[in-house]
Amino acid sequence: MRGLGSVSTTGIEILPKVCFGCGACIMSCPTHAITLIDRLAKVELNDCTGCDFCVPMCPVEAIFTISLDE
């Protein structure tokens, strides 16, 4: 969990063409890594722990788990 001192090898990506800004992902994020900017969800990967709680919450499947490994 990057936000709490350890390193995560996964994060999330939010597809802006699919997201309609409902905020369901924001409410499920324990580290508050997701915000709404211009009616679209945005993730701050430095705060994202890779927990993926937000992925199943998205009603339009705009959130995907990504690998942060190089």
Image (cartoon, grey):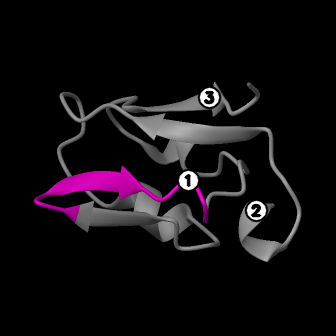
Query: Residue placed farthest to the front in the image?
Result: 70
Mark 1 touches mark 2? (CB < 8 Å): yes
Q: Give the residue type at disc 1.
A: Leu
User: Is residue 36 placed above or below 58 in the rendered structure?
Assistant: below
Q: Residues within 10 Å of mark 1 (few under 14, many from 20)?
A: some
Q: Position of residue 50 (x, y in %)?
A: 71, 48
Q: Nearer the viewer, residue 22 or 63?
A: 63
Q: Position of residue 8 (x, y in %)?
A: 81, 48
Q: Give the residue type at disc 3.
A: Ile
Q: Position of residue 2 (x, y in %)?
A: 76, 62
Asked which quadrant contains residue 59, the reply is top left
User: Is residue 33 placed above or below 7 in the rendered structure?
Assistant: below
The quadrant of the image that shows the N terminus is bottom right
Q: Nearer the viewer, residue 24 or 63?
A: 63
Which of discs 2 and 3 lies nearer the camera? The answer is 2
Residue sitting at x 72%, y 57%: 49
Residue beneath label 1, please?
45
Q: Give the residue type at disc 2.
A: Arg
Residue sitting at x 24%, y 39%: 19
| Residue range of the region highlighted in magenta in the rendering | 37-47
Q: Residues within 10 Å of mark 3 (few under 14, many from 20)?
A: few
Residue beneath label 2, please?
2
- Closer to the chain start, of discs 1 and 2, is 2
Query: Residue placed farthest to the right in the image?
Result: 6
User: In the drawing, does residue 26 fall left or right of residue 54?
Assistant: left
State how far apart marks 2 and 3 are (Cα).
15 Å
Residue sitting at x 10%, y 60%: 38
Residue beneath label 3, please?
66
Q: Secondary structure at mark 2?
A: helix
